[in-house]
Image (cartoon, rainbow, N blue to C red):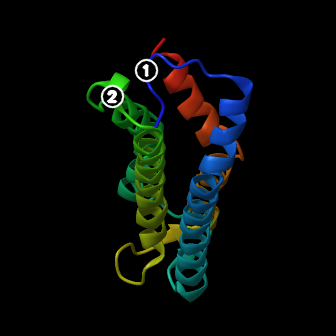
Amino acid sequence: MLESKEELTRERIEALRVELKPAERILQIIHSNFVVGSSFLVGVLYFQSQNIAGNNAPVPLLFLIVAVFAVLPSFIVPVLVRSMRPNPDERTVSQLATAYQVSHIIGCAMLETGIIFSAFAFLFNLVKEVPQWFVFVPAFLILVLLLRFPLPGKLTDWVIEQLESRR
């Protein structure tokens, strides 16, 4: 545990990087699961669909609107969740890492909701016809999810930033 008055030395930062490496790896595995699961579901629903029409078919607006509106909250809510924790001066390194992990998972789940809901347009009886180009809606959201992949060191850098803000 890091005391609030303790200096963050180079050795302590390197120790934190080693300590938080498993938490970063777990977050990357969870994020990969979101990507693979969403991609698989979109693929299955698309290739099993019998309602794909030409590009002149009407746009299923409900599915498009819900898919698009899932993007912005998926970026805003994790930031709000990270900042809502009570009294940051008393949080330990593991509590900070857990807060980051949970907020990232919440953001991914919100984005995955948009992906899955847009893929539901390909179900047999929900929409009479879906234009061929509509497959790009869940594909775009999957791309956004891929771009949010937690890079190595991102969690650790956030924890170090929070610890340094105590001083």
Task: Report the amino acid beneath label 1.
Answer: Ser
Please tell me which residue is depicted at 40% across the width and 48% down the height of the picture: 65
Using the image as rendered, state which of residue 73 and residue 163 is in the foreground.
Answer: 163
Please tell me which residue is depicted at 61% across the width and 22% down the height of the picture: 8
Name the secondary structure under disc 1: loop
As drawn, which residue projects farthest toward the top? Answer: 167
Using the image as rendered, state which of residue 124 and residue 38 is in the foreground.
Answer: 38
Position in image of residue 158 (x %, y %): 57, 32
Using the image as rendered, state which of residue 37 and residue 3 is in the foreground.
Answer: 3
Residue that carries the numbered disc 2 in the rendered image: 90
Question: Pointers 2 and 1 in contact (CB under 8 A)?
Answer: yes
Q: Earlier in the sequence, mark 2 or mark 1?
A: 1
Position in image of residue 68 (x %, y %): 46, 46
Name the secondary structure under disc 2: helix
Position in image of residue 42 (x %, y %): 56, 73
Task: Report the amino acid beneath label 2.
Answer: Glu
Say above or below: 7 vs 64. Answer: above
Left or right of 23? Residue 18 is right
Say above or below: 24 vs 35. Answer: above
Left or right of 86? Residue 36 is right
Residue that carries the numbered disc 1 in the rendered image: 4
